[in-house]
Image (cartoon, rainbow, N blue to C red):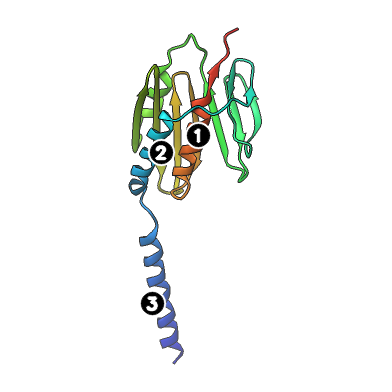
Amino acid sequence: MEIKETNLINVFLFVSLLLLVGCYPNIEETFPDVEASFKQKTMSDRQDINNDFGDISLYIPTNYEVVKEQTFNYVFLDQHEDLVILFYIPKEDEPRLLEQEAMAESLLFLTEEQGEEHFFLSVKSDDKLREIELTVGSGHVKLTKLTNYDKIVDDTVVLMEILHSYRWNDK
């Protein structure tokens, strides 16, 4: 009797594991929603700037805080303690360097032009960790965040809001 119960439990656990693995979303399944969010945000109105950092100004959502400032880098922390890294290069440097870097080995790479602005989005994945590196950029600035399948669309929207507000402060 004990052997049958053990076998039944093993079968139940095996079937549960198969269902769990089979239900986990594939990164490619999120691409249409990520692309739609990206394109919609490139066309949307700019967020009002609420932070000035000397060389640059930008919008930072109220649930984010700046936790580290370095030359050409800012690190933000959201309410879930997820990090967002903003990197920018001086206005006189070649702006397409960031785009070329993000293009390398991307699962998804999108570009969109709105007037004078050229936006890009890059998605890279680490299947072992089930994490996704999401990068959005335009010209001299890019933002990167590690995310997951469930949050990638929302994170795309937030990063695009920050990016779309970015302004270089001429002195």
Q: Residue at x 38, y 54 (%)?
A: 25
**Residue that badge 3 annotates:** 11
- Is residue 116 placed above or below 19 in the rendered structure? above
Q: From mark 3 to mark 1, how far is it between C-alphas? A: 44 Å
Mark 2 or 3, which is nearer the eye? 2
Q: Residue at x 35, y 23 (%)?
A: 113
Q: Amino acid at mark 3?
A: Val
Mark closer to the chain start, 2 or 3: 3
Q: Position of residue 95 (x, y in %)?
A: 43, 16
Q: Position of residue 136 (x, y in %)?
A: 44, 30
**Residue that badge 2 annotates:** 37
Q: Say few, some or many: other residues with alpha carbon within 10 Å of mark 1 (under 14 / 14 to 19 / 20 or more).
A: many
**Left or right: 111 in relation to 169:** left
Choose between 167 and 48: the one closer to the eye. 48
What secondary structure is marked by label 2?
helix
What secondary structure is marked by label 3?
helix
Q: Residue furthest front?
A: 45
